Amino acid sequence: MTPELQEAGAAQLAAAQARLQEASSGGRDAAFGRVLHGAQPDFAHGVALYLDEITVSFDGFKALNALSLAINVGELRCIIGPNGAGKTTMMDVITGKTRPDHGTASFGSNIDLLRLRENDIAQIGIGRKFQKPTVYEQLSVFENLELALKADRRVRASIFSRLTGTQLDRIAEILQLIHLLPEAQRTAGLLSHGQKQWLEIGMLLMQDPKLLLLDEPVAGMTDEETERTAELFLSLEGQHSLVVVEHDMKFVGELTQGWKKVTVLHEGSVLAEGTLADVQSNEKVVEVYLGR
Amino acid sequence: MSEMTTLKLPPPKRGLLLGKAGWTGLMLALIVVTVLAPLLNLVVPEGSVFHLSDYAVALIGKIMCYAICALAMDLIWGYTGILSLGHGLFFALGGYAMGMYLMRQIGHDGNYKSDLPDFMVFLDWKALPWAWAWSDSFIFQMICVVAVPGVLALIFGFFAFRSRIKGVYFSIITQAMTFAAMLLFFRNETGFGGNNGFTDFKRILGIPIAQPSTRMVLFVLTGLVLIGFWVMARYLVNSKFGRVLQAIRDAETRVMFTGYDPLAYKLAIWTLSAMMCGVAGALYVPQVGIINPGEMSAASSIEIAVWAAVGGRATLIGPIVGAFFVNGAKSAFTQIFPEFWLYFLGALFIAVTLFLPNGLVGLVAQLRERASTSAKLKQSRAAEQGADPATEIAQEARA
Amino acid sequence: MIRFLAGLGLVLFAALPAHALTTEQAKAISSGDTDARVAALNDAVARADTGLPKLVSALLDDAVKLTPAQVLIVDGEKVTDAATGAIATLPEDAEDVVNNNRMRGALQAAQAGLKLLSPDVALRREAVTELAKDTLDPSQLPLIDKALAAETDASLKDRLGLMRAALQIASPDKAQRLAAAQSLGESGMSQVKSLLQARLADGGETDAEVRGVLLSSVDKVSARLAWGERLGVVFTGISLGSILLLVALGLAITYGLMGVINMAHGELMMIGAYATYLVQNLFKAYLPGLFDWYILLAVPASFLAAALVGAVLERLVIRWLYGRPLETLLATWGISLVLMQGVRGLFGAQNVPVENPSWMSGGVAAMSNLTLPYNRLAIIVFAFAVLGGVALLIAKTRLGLFVRGVTQNRRMAACMGVNTARIDTYAFSLGAGIAGLAGCALSQVGNVGPDLGQSYIVDSFMVVVLGGVGQLAGTVYAALGLGVLNKLLEGWAGAVLAKIMVLVFIVVFIQKRPQGIFAMKGRSAEA
Amino acid sequence: ADTIKVGILHSLSGTMAISETVLKDVALMTIDEINAKGGVLGKKLEPVVVDPASNWPLFAEKAKQLIDQDKVAVVFGCWTSVSRKSVLPVFEEKNSLLFYPVQYEGEELSKNVFYTGAAPNQQAIPAVEYLMSKDGGGAKRFVLLGTDYVYPRTTNKILRAFLHSKGVADTDIMEEYTPFGHSDYQGIIAKIKKFAGEGKKTAVISTINGDSNVPFYKELGNQGLKATDVPVVAFSVGEEELRGVDTKPLVGHLAAWNYFMSIKNPTNTAFIKEWSDYAKAKGIPGHKDKPLTNDPMEATYIGIHMWAQAVAKAKSTDTDKVIAAMAGQTFKAPGGFTSTMDKENHHLHKPVFIGEVKADGQFNVVWKTPGPVVADPWSDYIPENKGKKNVPEKK
Amino acid sequence: MLKVDGLNQYYGGSHILRGLGFQAKLGEVTVVLGRNGVGKTTLLKSLMGVVPIKTGGIQLDSQDITKDTPYERVRKGVGYVPQGREIFGRLTVEENLRMGLAYKKAGTAIPPELFELFPVLKQMINRRGGDLSGGQQQQLAIARALAAGPKLLILDEPTEGIQPSIIKDIGRVIRMLADRKTMAIVLVEQFYDFAAELADQYLVMERGEIIARGRGEDMEANGVRDLMSI
Ligand SMILES: Nc1ncnc2c1ncn2[C@@H]1O[C@H](COP(=O)(O)OP(=O)(O)OP(=O)(O)O)[C@@H](O)[C@H]1O
Ligand SMILES: Nc1ncnc2c1ncn2[C@@H]1O[C@H](COP(=O)(O)OP(=O)(O)OP(=O)(O)O)[C@@H](O)[C@H]1O
Ligand SMILES: NC(N)=O
Ligand SMILES: [Mg+2]
Ligand SMILES: [Mg+2]
């Protein structure tokens, strides 16, 4: 995604938000649902991700209940909510891991996520960090990053590919960023829990996706690292869209910088939306989530 | 972050196909196969201690075919984590394709002096069934050697991988496929000689097959194919392709969420692996002189996996070593202890799993690592002596 | 059967004076050309000579010896003279009397003929059953009438009535033929069907009305026979399914729960079968009177033997391989080779004989063309009993809970205070023991030899995997489903093609359900 | 060398071990016996035993090994026709000798093989004739039931032609094959019952080989198909195979062979005694407690003796000389007749016996040929054989 | 209560724990702090006996348990909440809790107060553990360790992934358990504020060694927060 496009997207932000209000207040937008294989998402309307009335149930239990949500291009959105509210399930739906019973999910204004397979979704630019860190245990830290590197994902290309100097530099840069430079040649499976978390974030950065989904990225990090992570995410904001799920209110506070929107999920749908301060003072949110 | 870009990372030690030792080994292997073995078999007189008997040539030739299978198995199992119990089938299909050609080469020299292979005569068949259409064409059958296993693997793999069949479920359906094929081939009506399969071959490309020089040519060819496949496999696993395979083995979902399509990768390696087995089968049949559905039994496929595991999975040389070791041991044991050899073989498998979790090849690495670990330990202990009061306390406590 | 009726006829009508069997007669019956022997036998039967029944049954039991002077009946230690009934001694050079099938048939007919006169209703029933087996000869109609008149037992009366109808079907009297054709429609025997069809064939029945009745009777009988066949298929399917279930149950534990790809599972079954064999031999040697009940001891013995071997294997080998399923494949493959060769060394490469207890041989004739063998019935019951036991143990007991816990996360289970080493041993032994039970059951229907396990290992893995690994309920569905499907197809396509189709079915089915019938859904499946 | 090496090529493991192991033992016994009498040409025989593990390609490999590496003078071995077919090219190529001791389908005549088992006309055809006779029950319909491989297929092809020649129509013949190791005969027996229930006297001719016989006979017993109703005559079921079966329900079913253990004559008594003693001395499992002999064991025994006689006659172990010397060799066989090696066709002249199963697992001989029958390896009932000479072609 | 001496532990060639020693007292919460990969989890695993230690001794109630297997330690009163939850995915919530009672006599009931503490567990009593959300699993893991009423409770980052209100509850529970004076608690935590609030004693780890220790109330004063940064 080029900076120009970014700007175009940002320029349309306001208009898009207005439209979103309409969408969430009832009518379905008819522009979604076309499969364009390998196509680029169309961000011209300023919306990066749009979920509408998504319902997921497991044996009758509704993990997501008519959830609607829109993330703008370049936006950093924090999502909080009690354990079991459906945050992870929502990410599962976006990345194609779980198919919803009802609803639509689209990327940009043109790509119907529900019709794509996981790898296609990743290819068009949605990257994810799992709640439980998942890395390639038997490969080295370096190789983990190398595989995540943005490049042609096809078989033939992979057989003949060679790492270029710039790519090596990029890997080194990320290694430095995630504090794993000394561990570069170690087998990833031997890392500690927190190191794996970092490695997974590093892999996500290598992938350079348009939309990053981060499920509890700072769980198990020290306060200082949490701060650094916040800085890192803030530096990505604008160029990328981010959805961050966290229970660490301090971290959320740092990310939202007092004005950004926070969404509270509860029992599979949106309970409240607004600035952190807004939601923190919401009685219901305090009751089900924050506690007294 | 700007200062980070100045930081240089040593590029990982690959890219070059082989190290120095690797090239020497490769050359040595080539010389042994193409020069030494023919010399010892054909030129050195029979009485000499250096003479390589026909039996030994046939045995080594056969084991080299097995080694190709083990190598193929390693690509799919060792590197991609997919245990196939269908490689016996691919091997057999390659073998049958070659066998059909060899049957046709018998011509009128069979028992019944018929145009048709003997087994069709006792089935009262009057014409060749459709499956035998171009079986007298060497070229066509050689295409079949790779195409039949390849296409079968492609179709089977496509559906199985698309349905996300994994782990044992995949192993079991490959076994079901193989087992079904075995039953099918066991039937005489199927038209491939039933339980007897094909045997009593006379000629290949018009040249008598039993002739020592023919055998030697087949032997050398097998050796070259094995070495060639090894080099190819080596290249593949060292490429990014190979690392994607290993990533699929470790965390397939992650691979998917990174944007790779595991289906394409699995299908590619699976089909390649099947075709390698087909070639192995085709080389096996003229050297061993018989192909029958026994090769499709569950045990045969499991044995291929056993060779790879004994030698060491995910190390390309391991499966080859394993194939030679297990089959060599089997040949020796069935001769030396005809009544007890199964005890030895069984004990061997148990011992390898218990004591050599990384196979025979892993043993070397294991020993090397142990040496370096204990050296390191000694070092760090020495460094801590005195510096670390806790250690001292502990040592005192022990004394 | 004609010769049988001949014998019967003689018994009923030719009231020749009865007298004691002479040595000459006994000799004539016991030796010489078959034609002459049969004639001598029939002659003796006709006169209902005393002493004959004993000789006949002794001949059928191969318990008659011949010396130049005497015909001797050997009953264990006791030797009697066939003619006089006096106690005799058995000379060294006494020859065995050899009966071929024809002679044996004549002897059986004679025995049945003698039985039909018996006041004992059970004996009469045997005789009628014997009589019903074959096509009847019209000239014997009066005999049936006579037997019918004397018969008091209602069910026997019915059966004899049917026979009379079978004979009257060719009567010159149209009314009789009509009645016969009508009543034969109530039969469910394939002989009756062929009889009716024979009447309908060229040169048989010409009267249109009778033909009509005949046709409808053929249809009725055919329909009944078809039911027998259908039920037969279902029964054999369930029977096969119950065997599959038994062989898979142990594996559902060692593999499904513990994750050990146990290639030696078949050999554990083999051990159970050999244990059964040994128990049987012990009974033969020491408790011959209780032989029929040896199976009651063989069941626990086979369980214990296999469980013990399982425990040893677990302690020595398997224990080091948890969490490395593919290594367990390799090691247990080795174990299976060793066990097989070990049994070959101990018992020989040949099969060993395991006899069914007498109550398990033969079967109940549920319909004329449907015999349900007792051993198969017993195995079905047994399989479900074992299933019930295992299901209870796994789902409801603490041990079951620990087994499931340990097999899912060994380290955490230890951190919960579970002695994982012991639970592992118990669990593996349990799986092995159930394999042993399967072996005990298999010994009642098939071979007991060193290769016993090899023939079932593939099937048992298929069942467990098709059902869904770790899913006991899935195992049950898979076993019974495959059993019945296999037999349905077998009737239509033959054994081999049926099996191939079943395998193809498995391949296709797994495409639809990549985790087996009872796939675990959701996140817990990924763990 | 001061010994003469002889190879023994029988499966000691795998599915065929059940039948073949004992042939290895009887061969060793016979070799001991010959050695005890001073060996051959003044040299002791030295057996080389290998295990081809029921794996047909391995048979070929092991044959090569015996000939190439161990330089054996002769090989005694094989059971199934497949294994024989697999080693045949090896023996022909190396011009070495194989003695094959099992009844088989014929349709083969190699200069390098001596067939000491029966050809179809020495077993199958007399058995069917017997079934059709009055004593045999006068069978009119036949079920040809076999394991699906070359021996049963070929035998049944011959038998069908033979039955045609006796006026039996195709509708009265049912042909069924099961794979090796098939173990569930419920369906097939139901089918046979149905076929037999259609009227005429029916008999079953079984060429089931190997393990499958036990479940087959067990099912037969359970479904109450008695020999007096539907007799089964088998060509591959002998004393050893019945060891694993409860024979009480099977009394009266038949087998055709050239030898039965129950045959009474001094040679056989001596043979059985020799075997019992040997089995006890060597602790051969199964046989040490319950020694059994059977037809292929007898054929092995005859084969080794005849070979030794031929070597003595030829004064050499050279293949061609031994082949020449084999012609017309005679040996007083445990079967009670003097077996003669045909002057030309490499087959023995053998008597045919038909036995009925007894409750103790032995056979009652109920019929036998008046004397030895000459083998007809190229059966006249196969049209393609017209004009074939009963002489191996020289290569 | 718990006494650890000169603990040395290695993974292959690398020295992970370097002569660690400390004590934890009944009724006290001992908090272990340290950055990622310094060996906190390894320390707790050594306490549980799931990884072997090279040298050093562990005493519980002045009883040496260094050589004991994990389950023997549990029997002597150790309870463990591992990092990464490690619940039994295919067992139901109830069965998970019953596993927690494994060494108790058969038929011991699940203490009802667990459900008061974590009401969601009651609600999902028959759901499979693996299907729970991350935070729910974490609650289950804590409840499971508490079920048997241990003397020494070891917690490895128990707040990871848990919603704030429940973190507060957990804090209260830990405090309450400690205050009963029947239990010693060792808590590994990255969440400084949470740790600081609970700590009676603290230990800071760095590269397998304890580089600072002290009383909980002095944490802020001793600049522990800074020790945790790079
Ligand atoms: N396969 C399943 N079967 C049954 N219930 C499920 C399944 N998957 C998820 N759930 C339930 O759905 C709800 C939502 O789960 P989800 O993981 O999305 O929550 P979350 O918001 O991510 O929670 P946390 O903050 O604890 O991670 C939970 O109550 C969970 O128990
Ligand atoms: N099985 C193992 N083999 C080799 N090294 C290991 C292994 N497990 C952990 N390590 C290494 O040991 C060190 C300590 O790991 P540990 O898990 O104890 O860290 P931690 O302090 O708990 O970190 P975190 O806060 O991230 O959970 C790390 O450097 C890690 O890479
Ligand atoms: N020759 C046989 N029985 O295979
Ligand atoms: Mg979550
Ligand atoms: Mg940790």
Image (cartoon, rainbow, N blue to C red):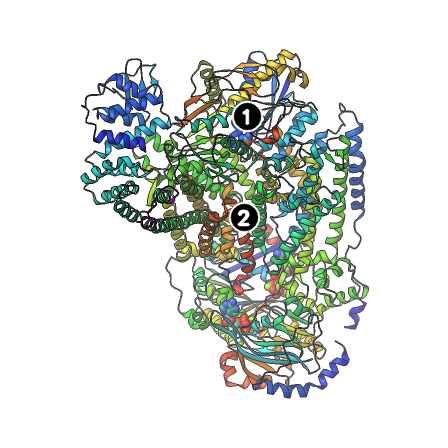
Q: Residue D115 appears at what percent x and percent y? A: 58, 23
- The three-letter amino acid code for the residue at tag 2 is Ile
Whether residue C204 is in magenta: the answer is yes
Q: Are discs 2 and 1 both within one chain? A: no
Residue A212 horizontal/vertical position (percent): 66, 73
Q: Which circle marks residue E27 in the picture?
A: none
Return the residue nearer the eye: C362 or B335. C362
Residue marked by disc 2 = C500
Three-letter amino acid code at the position of disc 1: Ala
In the rendering, at what x and y percent does residue C319 appear? 52, 47
Residue C224 magenta-highlighted: no
Of the pair C477 and A230, the residue shown nearer to us: C477
Q: Residue at position x 38%, y 45% from top? A: C379
Disc nearest the viewer among 2 and 1: 1
Q: Is residue C315 left or right of residue C89?
A: right
Chain to which the residue tagged by mark 1 belongs = D
Query: In the rendered image, which residue does mark 1 sit on?
Result: D119
How many marks the image carries: the answer is 2
Ligand 5 appears in which quadrant? bottom right
Name the foreground residue: B353 vs B134.
B134
User: Where is residue C276, by image quadrant?
Assistant: top left
Magenta residues span: C200-211
